[in-house]
Image: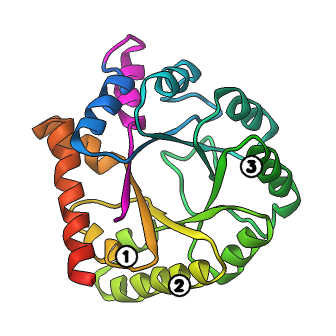
Amino acid sequence: MIRLGVNVDHVATVRQARMIDIPDPVEAALLAETGGADLITVHLREDRRHIQEYDVARLRERLSVGLNLEMAGTGEMTAHALALRPDDACLVPERREELTTEGGLDVVAHADQLREVVARLRGAGIRVSLFVDPDPRQIEASRELGADAVELHTGTYCDAAVDRVARELEAVRRGAALAAGLGLEVHGGHGLNTENVTPIAAIEEIVELNIGHSIVARSIMVGMVEAVREMKALIAGAETAGG
């Protein structure tokens, strides 16, 4: 059964627009739990544009499901992760000018820096995934660094023009097969919504999907509990059809 990680960053985005206490991403996370979320994902960005350290601390205290912390592979963020102790940490690229994470981490180019970060996090009992494009070189480098998992960047597939969708989906399929064959757990995320999640969820090797913006957007219309239930049902249907 594919695990669904619900990312509540954009609940915090709305809160930070007014710099007040509402809406509360922790309350949203607890509602996501009620809807069937298997874990909660948040990205503690270096510029703190949405999620804050106190959000992560409160989530750590109140969640019944796992907490997945997305973070840049820097010394500062590693220190925060070691203090906050999430269940999982996903290392992602980060640029201040971007609206959201764009593209996968270049593990090959930053192997020396990332190796130390991975080792420190895993040494503290935190499972580590690397957010990478479905590129064989990046997947193989992730395995060499000792990561527990890779999260395959699905954004290129999600944003592809109609005549390129099949090609991009096949790239994700091949990446998932390679990663699993190397002994890595395979996750997926970025840009997934109710219109495009089914083919990704049907990939046999994928065991976790992390989805944020589309669920938060849908929750404005139907509530967080129902938005999560809808996504869970789509994922379950894809698994059943694929199996």
Q: How far apart are marks 3 and 1 (CA)?
A: 35 Å
Which element carries disc 1, helix, strand or loop? loop
For label 3, count other residues whose C-alpha is less than 10 Å away and answer few (under 14), some (14-19) or many (20+).
Answer: some
Which element carries disc 2, helix, strand or loop? helix
Residue at the top extreme of this rendering = 20
Residue at 75%, 38% (x, y): give it.
Answer: 78
Disc marking residue 160 = 1
For label 2, count other residues whose C-alpha is less than 10 Å away and answer few (under 14), some (14-19) or many (20+).
Answer: some
For label 1, count other residues whose C-alpha is less than 10 Å away and answer few (under 14), some (14-19) or many (20+).
Answer: some
Q: Quadrant of residue 129?
A: bottom right
The image shows residue 119, relative to residue 33, as above or below, that is below
- Decide which of 163, 11 is in the foreground and name it: 11
Numbered disc in front, either 3 or 1: 3
> The magenta stretch spans which residues?
1-22
Q: Position of residue 181 (x, y in %)?
A: 61, 84
The image shows residue 120, relative to residue 177, as above or below, that is above
Q: Where is residue 143 in the image (x, y as percent from the top left)?
A: 73, 71
Residue beneath disc 2: 177
Amino acid type at image mark 2: Ala
Q: Which of marks 3 and 1 is nearer the N terminus?
A: 3
Residue at 37%, 11% (x, y): give it.
Answer: 21
Residue beneath disc 3: 122
Residue 98 is one of the magenta-drawn residues: no
Amino acid type at image mark 3: Arg
Residues at discs 1 and 2 in contact (Cβ within 8 Å) = no
Relative side of 68 to 209, left or right:
right
Q: Where is residue 79 in the image (x, y as percent from the top left)?
A: 77, 31
Q: Where is residue 116 in the image (x, y as percent from the top left)?
A: 86, 51
Which element carries disc 3, helix, strand or loop? helix
Relative side of 135 to 111, left or right:
left
